[in-house]
Image (cartoon, rainbow, N blue to C red):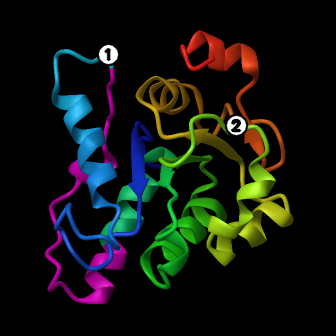
Amino acid sequence: MAYRSGTYVAFHAGGTTDPTAPNSDIKYYNLLKGWNASSRHEFRLTDSHEKTSAVRDTSLKATLAARLRERLNNSKNMLLIITRNTIKDRDWVPYEITYAVDTCGIPIIAAYPDFDIIRKPADLWGLWPICLKDRINNNTASVIHIPYRQTVINNAINQFDPSNRPLGNGLGYYSNEAYRSFGLL
């Protein structure tokens, strides 16, 4: 069994590494890396993407899939960045979700940049890829739905792993008390 210490970050890249591209969410991944690198923040991310060698955009699909599986196998959780772009992804995000839930059994931390507080995750179903909807509906995915905020993400990635899953049958969310402790209420 793999040693699971990392957080796997999944997002819709839109086929680009350009953080200004309107149909890509790579800017949110880059922001996470910036928080982690800064000494001004108490944010720490053990990024599963950095635990294996890089894959170029021109790599064969089979090579990329193998690398993603390796990274997921070594992850304790998945941070899934969900925006209006996520549902457009028809290949890698669904693949990553499916493998994370069905094979690795890791919890998903669904982070939404466009929301300050999440109280009714089911109201966000229109943003979810079909594979996530299916796994929430059949109770195979352990998911906590959170706003994309540094303190909340930091708490979730340090709290949830295969032995400590979010409550809520795929529709987990933080309480008002938790939001107050994060300074969001």
Task: Locate residue 183: give its quadrant.
Answer: top right
**Which region is colored magenta?**
43-66
Residue 101 vs 24, above or below: the answer is: above
How many angstroms separate mark 2 from mark 1 (CA)? 23 Å
Q: Position of residue 62 (x, y in %)?
A: 32, 86
Badge 2: residue crowd in 10 Å (few <14, some 14–19, many ≥20)? many
Q: Is 123 part of what is drawn in magenta?
A: no
Residue 149 vs 68, above or below: the answer is: above
Residue type marked 2: Arg
Tell whether 93 sits left or right of 144.
left
The residue shown at (71%, 58%) is 124
Tell whether 15 sits left or right of 151.
left
Compare residues 91 and 15 and report the one nearer the observer.
15
Would you name the residue on which mark 1 appears? 42
Q: Position of residue 149 (x, y in %)?
A: 46, 33
Callout 1: SS: loop
Q: Is 51 part of what is drawn in magenta?
A: yes
Tell whether 50 sits left or right of 128.
left
Would you name the residue on which mark 2 appears? 165
Tell whether 76 sits left or right of 101.
left
On residue 139, the disc is none
Residue type marked 1: Glu
The residue shown at (66%, 74%) is 131
Compare residues 49 and 29 and report the one nearer the observer.
29
Callout 2: SS: loop
Compare residues 182 and 100 and report the one nearer the observer.
182
Q: Quadrant of the C terminus?
A: top right
Compare residues 44 and 50 and report the one nearer the observer.
44
